[in-house]
Amino acid sequence: MRARFDASYMKDLYASEVLARPYVESAGPSKQSSGSLASQFSLTGSLSDRIEIGIVWAARSRIGRINLFDFERQTISATIRFVP
């Protein structure tokens, strides 16, 4: 049985919503950024010499609003891998 944890920080640049308005306000359009934290925890194990199974839990949250119970951006996946 193997366990692995990965975490990463991403900074996304985007145009502000001011660009979508018909009249640009006095501040004008600008680029804004949003940081997010992605993490992944996986467990893998071998059933035999040629078959591995795994389960992965992954989550992504904005830095400004981290909530472990925000199930909207959490995924669980299972894999079966055949090794030649």
Image: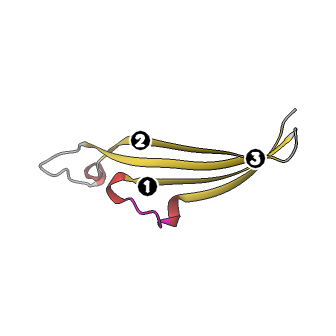
The image's mark for residue 45 is 3
In this view, the mark in front (3 or 1): 3
The residue that mark 2 highlights is 10
What is the magenta range?
66-70
Please rate how many residues cluster around mark 1, counting C-alpha atoms within 10 Å: few if below 14, some from 14 to 19, many from 20.
Answer: some
Please rate how many residues cluster around mark 3, counting C-alpha atoms within 10 Å: few if below 14, some from 14 to 19, many from 20.
Answer: some
Determine the residue positioned at 25% across, 51% down: 18
The residue that mark 1 highlights is 61
Q: Earlier in the sequence, mark 2 or mark 1?
A: 2
The magenta stretch spans residue 45: no
Q: Is residue 71 left or right of residue 81?
A: left
Q: What is the CA distance from the residue labelled 3 to the residue labelled 2?
A: 30 Å
Q: Is residue 57 left or right of residue 32?
A: right
Dot 3: what SS?
A: strand
Cβ–Cβ under 8 Å for marks 3 and 2: no
Determine the residue positioned at 11% across, 49% down: 26
Determine the residue positioned at 46% across, 63% down: 68
Name of the residue lying farthest toward the front: 1
Dot 1: what SS?
A: strand
In this view, the mark in front (3 or 2): 3
Please rate how many residues cluster around mark 2, counting C-alpha atoms within 10 Å: few if below 14, some from 14 to 19, many from 20.
Answer: few
- Image spot of residue 82 (x, y percent): 85, 40
Q: What is the CA distance from the residue labelled 2 to the residue labelled 1?
A: 10 Å
- Observer-nearest of 1 and 84: 1
Visual colour scheme: secondary structure
Q: Earlier in the sequence, mark 3 or mark 1?
A: 3
- Image spot of residue 58 (x, y percent): 56, 53
